[in-house]
Amino acid sequence: MDLKRILSVVAKNRLLFFLGVAGLVLLLFTGITPEEKTAVNPLEAAESYRLSLEKDIAAACESVKGVGSVRVLLSLATTEIAVYEKNQSGDSQTLALSGGDGMLLCYRMPEIAGVSVVCTGGGSPTVKQELTSLLCKSLDIPSTAVHIAPLK
């Protein structure tokens, strides 16, 4: 009986019913488009990352006692690395440069190869030691990858 009553209401208000269904369909499918793949240039991403780090390093070095004007040069070991997961016989994650096979998990930022700091006060052994310690700990690099020089 309930089904007959529902069908009679739908029959009486057919136009309103179909407009409601059409509205729901439009709401469901509005904005759903195939995912656009935007190509990220790994070299541009690495350059932007390097410049941002240089600015942050310069600000940190300028805050050290005995350091004045600072110029920083940072070198990166690699470009941005895409991490893909391979699903072959239970293999775990594998690292590959952009364009690898499998599902993209995330991007890893480039590793830092070394940093050079030229600053006023950079000739002082105390300042060199403070800056080297600061850079080694904050960038997770060995002291052999850090060079401090005085600004002329």
Image: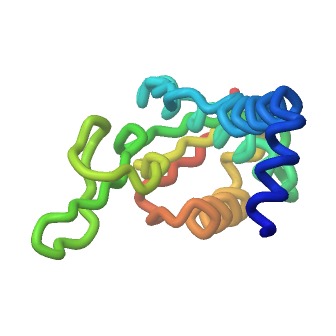
Q: Is residue 22 left or right of residue 65?
A: left
**In the image, is residue 143 above or below residue 116?**
below
**In the image, is residue 90 above or below residue 140?**
below
Rendering quarter of residue 127: bottom right
Q: Is residue 94 left or right of residue 35?
A: left
**In the image, is residue 35 above or below residue 87?**
above
Q: Is residue 56 left or right of residue 99?
A: right
Q: Nearer the viewer, residue 69 or 22?
A: 22
Q: How many marks?
A: 0
Hey, which residue is sitting farthest left in the picture? Answer: 89
Q: Nearer the viewer, residue 12 or 91?
A: 12
Q: Is residue 15 visible in this depiction of the protein?
A: yes
Coordinates of residue 139 in the picture (x, y in percent): 57, 60
Coordinates of residue 145 in the picture (x, y in percent): 43, 54
Placement of the C terminus among the 4 image quadrants: top right
Placement of the N terminus among the 4 image quadrants: bottom right
Residue at image position (70%, 47%) is: 57
Rendering quarter of residue 85: bottom left
Q: Is residue 112 visible in this depiction of the protein?
A: no
Q: Nearer the viewer, residue 66 or 133?
A: 133
Q: Nearer the viewer, residue 61 or 18?
A: 18
Coordinates of residue 106 in the picture (x, y in percent): 46, 53
